[in-house]
Image: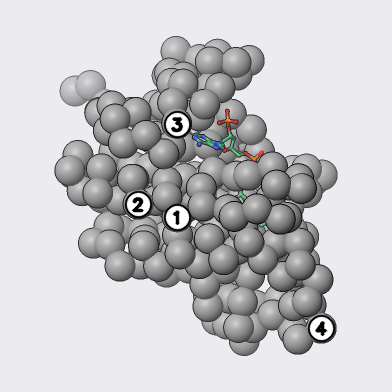
Amino acid sequence: MEKTVKKLLIIGASSGIGLWTVQKALKQGYAVRAFSRHAEKMRIRHDRLDKVNGNALDAGNVATALKGCDAVIQTLGVALNLKMLTGPVTLFSEATKVLVPAMAEASVNRLIAVTGYGAGESKHYMPLWERPGFNMVFGRAYGDKDKQEDIIKASQLDWTIVRPVVLVDAFGSGGYKEFTDPKQFRNGIISRADVAHFITKEIGGESYVREGVVLRR
Ligand SMILES: NC(=O)c1ccc[n+]([C@@H]2O[C@H](COP(=O)([O-])OP(=O)(O)OC[C@H]3O[C@@H](n4cnc5c(N)ncnc54)[C@H](OP(=O)(O)O)[C@@H]3O)[C@@H](O)[C@H]2O)c1
């Protein structure tokens, strides 16, 4: 009998954690739809990969991209620039407002979304001395990630929220730890490859459905 290949929609696939997840998912035998505004510029090629240029804020783009997919991985990011530091950040919440009803409409129930340590309840466990600097640089983005998490948690989806600490591109995969107990939440570093490793493991194993997980080396 022909094996059914699970197809993943990765929103924010063209760089960072999203790109690492594309590579790892393909290696593990998944079919992948890589979605971002510039997906077609991705150099990677594979017969189980299709690249879709689209905007996560556009309901039509997202509905079309969901067709034939079994699960969604949301790894959207904004550039760390003056606009992010001084202007409003709405990408995370607005894209999630588009995604959640579109997934319900398409009967796609599994969502793994990357936010970050400092979003949702994890911010309450950040040491007091760390908060002013964090808020000054990331306050706007993480304020919007809080809203993103609230939308996801209020949904009927089988969601997992992934909260990596500071991302680096050094190190390969493996050797990171997973925390759901807030008493163990604290900052540190983790590689994007490790976050992608966790995401693909979670798609296969589903250990943290309706939970937020902090990842740290
Ligand atoms: N930097 C850190 O230390 C840190 C720590 C914890 C958590 N995080 C979070 O981890 C996540 C991933 O970060 P990263 O640095 O690995 O990723 P990244 O390089 O910032 O990649 C972001 C992705 O989002 C896509 N994107 C942005 N706007 C889009 C839109 N409107 N529609 C469709 N796609 C869009 C980009 O592609 P296009 O430009 O082609 O659209 C790109 O593929 C972010 O949410 C970040 O805040 C970061």
Task: Tell me which residue sits at (76%, 45%) in the image.
Answer: 81
Q: Which residue is mark 2?
A: 97
Say whether marks 3 and 1 touch (CB < 8 Å): no
Q: Does any atom of ligand 1 lie closer than 8 Å to the CB of label 4? A: no
User: Please, what is the three-letter code of the amino acid marked with disc 2?
Assistant: Lys
User: Please, what is the three-letter code of the amino acid marked with disc 1?
Assistant: Ser
Residue mark closest to the camera, 4 vs 1 = 1
Q: Which residue is mark 1?
A: 93
Q: Is residue 156 left or right of residue 39?
A: left
**Which secondary structure lies at badge 2?**
helix
Asked if 154 appears above or below 159 in the picture, the reply is below
| Relative image position of residue 215 (x, y in whole percent) | 63, 63
> Based on the displayed image, in which of its 4 quarters is residue 169 positioned?
top right
Q: Which residue is mark 3?
A: 55
Q: Does any atom of ligand 1 lie closer than 8 Å to the CB of label 3? A: yes
**Which secondary structure lies at badge 1?**
helix
